[in-house]
Amino acid sequence: MNVEDRLFLNRFNADDRSHLKVIDPEVCLKCKRKQCSPSCPSKCYTIQDGKAVVAYEGCLECGTCRIVCNEFFNIGWKYPRGGFGVSFKFG
Amino acid sequence: MPSKSEEELKFDVIVVGAGPAGTTAAYVLAKAGINVVIFERGKYPGSKNVMGGILYRKPTEDIIPGFWKEAPLERNIIEQKLWILSKDSAVNVGYRSASFDKEPYNCFTVMRAHFDKWFADKAVEQGALLINETVVESLIKENGKVIGVKTGREEGDVYTDVVIIADGVNSLLAKEAGFHPEIPPEKVALAVKDTIFLPKEKIEERFNITHNQGVTIELIGQITQGMAGGGFIYTNKESISVGLACLCSDFMKTGITPYDLINQMESHPVIKPLIEGGEIKEYSAHLIPEGGYDAIPSLYGDGYLIAGDAAMLVNPVHREGSNYATASGMSAANTVIRAKERNDFSAKGLSHYKTLLEESFIMKDLKKYRRVSRFSIENSHMFSLYPEFINQAAHEMITVDGVPKKEKQKKIWKLLKRKRSLTNLIKDAFNIWRSFK
Ligand SMILES: Cc1cc2nc3c(=O)[nH]c(=O)nc-3n(C[C@H](O)[C@H](O)[C@H](O)COP(=O)(O)OP(=O)(O)OC[C@H]3O[C@@H](n4cnc5c(N)ncnc54)[C@H](O)[C@@H]3O)c2cc1C
Ligand code: SF4
Ligand code: SF4
């Protein structure tokens, strides 16, 4: 099953504002490995013109992107506001 | 300095996070008549939490005797197996016992979204106040001492004598306050998991179990594609939890995506028949702190204590974490009860926490395994070469083809030496022994 279909099974209550932020997209141009993209389990990051773009809606709130962007620390990572984001039915 | 008004909101104790660490602390404190509030960011406790998940009986029983009679548990584990996988085979080691099939039981599978909610309700019954859908955004400090928390709600400042930080592995709070550094990628694993539904009868037939009996299978070898980590297959009542966890640093090195990894795992010829025909109903991901003893941050200070995953209290070798969370939550609560008697919530007054942890199985176990974490980072061949070899050896010995067994042993030994020099083999054996001794 591809990741999009998997995410479709989960319950999300997406906020209207993103809890994730690429702090300075220009910095991504210097980043060779661009780890945020392959490491995210829900494929939230795509690389466009060498810069990371994040779609927060399908975020599973694991924290991996923040951990792996360890060269430039370029990801502003917060939790969604209370009650928003993913809600696991089983967990 | 934060301004305080006359009618400021104040509790004896603030607990951040309604996972096993926070809820245990709140339960014990409320039972002792202490005025405690728990803030949980999820819609309900457990809605943000993921685990394999095996819940060990003992630590929870210490808080709620006989809890298994009413808690929402999945299955009672009577058999635990380890599968060492090559690309198309598995060597199986396991232990099954009828003695695990009766009270007081040994361990259970649980779904955290169900269990955490039940457990938090129990703390509420004892008098704790649970406030869901509320993110604690930062700690309020005065002269270096923690005196309260800032929540995401309007006029959301709440004051206290002591904050128990039980906000899990990412612990933004401990980081923000500078108690705790960012976790480097080689000290934390990313886990992904599918909850796959199947009719009860199918599960029982495939795993050779009846009514509430359950089986756990830990997996190492080919499925992690050389990365340090492992997989798991656990039986629930009407579903199977299937997942794997590998160090973030290894995901970085290999560039393998977590979803490709779980897909490949599920199509492994030995695993596939177990989940065939099942329906995935949820996909989850979570980090596991795997730094071990040497990664534990400072655990207390003026006006605060850190418990559970936030304090990196996890034993990666035995997939234990919820039990450490529960036990550390209990120690945190007992420390606070003592501090309250003396009215001393300074770092000195709370230092008893460290003593309690040192005396418990938590620190003893973590010390015992302190080398394992480093060892697995430096020796990724343990996760690829040996599993492959063990399977080849088993294949040789089990295949009946007229070759004498003695010759087969020789052939196996040669095969191993070709893959890894004798010196390295001896080094490995020594390192394994030292890590686990
Ligand atoms: C895939 C996987 C499998 C595992 N398998 C096992 C197993 O089989 N057995 C076992 O014993 N352990 C297992 N573990 C480990 C176990 O899940 C953890 O050790 C345990 O959950 C830690 O409990 P905790 O209370 O410290 O943290 P958590 O359970 O993470 O609880 C933290 C709570 O805090 C809340 N929170 C976080 N930040 C805030 C904030 N700022 N404001 C308000 N609320 C906040 C969260 O929503 C959450 O409810 C596994 C872990 C994973 C990821
Ligand atoms: S890893 Fe960090 S710096 Fe690199 S592309 Fe991603 S966000 Fe940008
Ligand atoms: S927190 Fe996890 S799921 Fe969310 S964007 Fe980061 S890596 Fe992806």
Image (spheres, coloured by chain):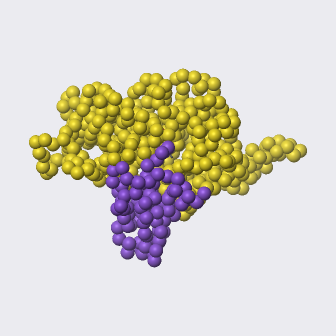
Chain colours: A purple, B yellow
Residue at 66% of width from left, 36% of height from top? B201
Looking at the image, which residue sits at the far right?
A: B402
Residue at 33% of width from left, 50% of height from top? A82
Can you see residue A58?
yes
Choose top left, top right, bottom left or bottom right for residue A57: bottom left
In the image, taking residue B41 as reference, residue A87 lies left or right, namely right
Residue B366 position, x and y percent, is: 45, 39
Q: Nearer the viewer, residue B247 or B127?
A: B127
Residue at 60% of width from left, 25% of height from top? B101
Image height of B286 relative to B70, above or below? below
Choose top left, top right, bottom left or bottom right for residue B409: top right
Image height of A41 relative to B334, above or below? below
Residue B66 position, x and y percent, is: 46, 23
Residue B297 position, x and y percent, is: 35, 46
Residue B343 position, x and y percent, is: 18, 31
Residue at 41% of width from left, 72% of height from top? A28
Can you see residue B362?
no
Q: Nearer the viewer, residue B186 or A2?
A: A2
